[in-house]
Amino acid sequence: DAKTTQPPSMDCAEGRAANLPCNHSTISGNEYVYWYRQIHSQGPQYIIHGLKNNETNEMASLIITEDRKSSTLILPHATLRDTAVYYCIVRPKAAGNKLTFGGGTRVLVKP
Amino acid sequence: DAGVIQSPRHEVTEMGQEVTLRCKPISGHNSLFWYRQTMMRGLELLIYFNNNVPIDDSGMPEDRFSAKMPNASFSTLKIQPSEPRDSAVYFCASSPDSGGADTQYFGPGTRLTVL
């Protein structure tokens, strides 16, 4: 499985953009990059995913470098409700839908 | 859509007792997953089913754990006998089986405490 590396924690000011980095230098050509988050006492929530192109949805944007060895999740206007643990996951194609969660980044949005 | 439904939300039991956790996946989803979350080990995949068939149970810790999916709308995770180290939050998730990069939708979890 391709492993990911994320900073353990980061703070962000409310209303500002939050940029969450993730390194996945051993990613294979057909592996997707997924982002999930887990708000305290809730189940993980899907945010976005991508293969090699940048992606945007109503929650966030995903920027994947051209060599695909790293990516950045962007929350354009962070709110207090965005305080959560954010997981960057690389999905192994051969194992179907299996997701392996690492330690994630604990994001604290401050007023 | 009600999302993934899990019951009970909280369970407190004594060591040695049998515990059964239940999950109803999102209608139409063909894959179902059981995860366990603890402070020490984080989120771990225990087992996943595709079209009601167990595909990968390599994460099931030992024979005390068993999971079944008798039909497309119901799954159980059973622990017998339970031990204090089984205390954790157990999540069920489901995903559509449309091939490619399917997302998983998680339930609210069952918080299990074994005394």
Image (tube, helix red, strand yellow):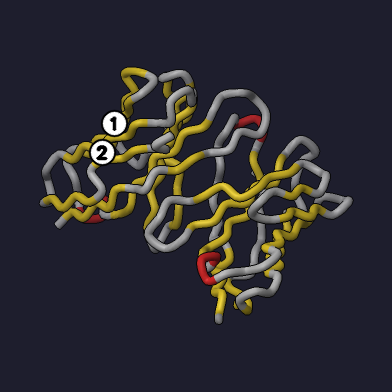
| Residue B37 on image: x %, y % | 39, 53
Quarter holding the N terminus of chain A is top right
Chain letter for mark 2: B
**Would residue B58 be visible to someone looking at this image?**
no
Q: From this view, report whether residue A69 is shown above or below residue B51.
A: below
Determine the residue positioned at 88% across, 51% down: A66
- Above or below, A86 against A3 in this view is below
Picture coordinates of residue B82, whole percent (x, y): 19, 45
Q: Quadrant of the C terminus of chain A?
A: bottom right
Q: Residue sitting at 52 percent across and 63 percent down?
A: A85
Q: Amino acid at mark 1?
A: Thr
Callout count = 2
For label 2, the crowd category at 10 Å Cα-Cα, with few meaning under 14, some 14 to 19 and many 20 or more, is many
Looking at the image, residue B8 sits to the left or right of residue B102; the answer is left
Residue B54: percent from left, percent from top? 42, 24
**Label 1 crowd bin: few (<14), some (14–19), many (20+), radius 10 Å:** some
Question: At 44% across and 26% down in the image, what residue appears?
Answer: B49
Can the viewer see residue B32 in this picture?
yes
Q: Which mark is residue A3?
A: none
Q: Say whether disc 2 or disc 1 marks the residue closer to the N-terminus.
A: 2
Which element carries disc 2, helix, strand or loop?
A: strand
Q: Nearer the viewer, residue A32 or B94?
A: B94
Whole-angstrom CA distance, mark 2 to mark 1, is 6 Å
Relative horizontal placement of residue A98, taking residue B32 as reference (left or right): right
According to the picture, the residue beneath numbered tag 2 turns out to be B21
Secondary structure under tag 1 reads strand
Label 2–label 1 contact, CB within 8 A: yes
Please name the residue that numbered disc 1 is placed on. B76
Q: Residue at x 40, y 55 (%)?
A: A42
